[in-house]
Amino acid sequence: GAGVSQSPSNKVTEKGKDVELRCDPISGHTALYWYRQRLGQGLEFLIYFQGNSAPDKSGLPSDRFSAERTGESVSTLTIQRTQQEDSAVYLCASSLDSLPANYGYTFGSGTRLTVV
Amino acid sequence: AQKVTQAQTEISVVEKEDVTLDCVYETRDTTYYLFWYKQPPSGELVFLIRRNSFDEQNEISGRYSWNFQKSTSSFNFTITASQVVDSAVYFCALTFNNDMRFGAGTRLTVKP
């Protein structure tokens, strides 16, 4: 597609439920990144994919968080047993390769997750 | 440590004023890249500029200009003759391995 698409744009869930957030990167972009942005704060790195592999999972805040990517395209970020502290905007970005210095990132509009 | 500091949390100016957004970074790397992104109310981050560590030449793009000073580890962003449409959160970022490390952002409000 023309840009990075994320769905849903908004999600309200009850504490303890699982949620799945979806990211459709720009076609042909091999690198895909997930960030979390808490209210009024900067972007917190979660995970990145090069192709379908995730060389760096160091940013995932707990084992309740997982992500996968298939077909070098769509990625899903799953949060199990959601907690109120998980409330944030989850941003996805893609890049032509894994070196952000070369091309920078193109960001999606994010998924605003609210855990009540 | 790799770190980006944007000390100004919020700035409010009146239209047509000039405004400078500060960015200070820390890195052990000799080769690195710095970025500025704009996040309007719609939420999508918009790429503004990339600068590599070997190029300290300042850059101007329309009403936007950037001042890169390695001696003070700063990469400041100036908007000249600000407009209401410039209202947004602006993020400075530093490349770190395969990801970018972002500052906390500066919320700029331009009042008519």
Image: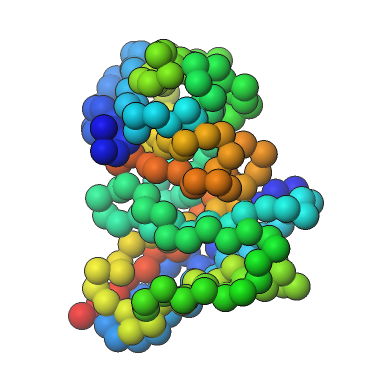
Residue A61, visible in the rendered structure = no
Give the vertical position of A79 relative to B61 (above or below): above
- Of all residues, the one furthest to the left in this rendering is B112
The answer to which of B20 and A62 lies nearer the viewer is B20
Name which residue lies at 56% across and 20% down: A54
**Viewed as shown, does residue A61 lie left or right of A69?**
right
Q: Position of residue B27 (x, y in %)?
A: 73, 53
Type of colouring: rainbow
Residue B53, visible in the rendered structure = yes
Q: Position of residue A116 (x, y in %)?
A: 30, 27
**Viewed as shown, does residue B71 lie left or right of B14?**
right
Give the vertical position of A13 relative to B87 (above or below): above
Residue B16, quarter of picture:
bottom left
Q: Position of residue B44 (x, y in %)?
A: 32, 47
**Viewed as shown, does residue B95 lie left or right of A42?**
right
Q: Position of residue A82 (x, y in %)?
A: 40, 20
The answer to which of B3 and A5 lies nearer the viewer is A5
What count of labels does the image hold?
0
Name which residue lies at 50% across and 21% down: A51
Q: Quadrant of the C terminus of chain B?
A: bottom left
Name which residue lies at 49% across and 47% down: A104
Residue B107, quarter of picture:
bottom left
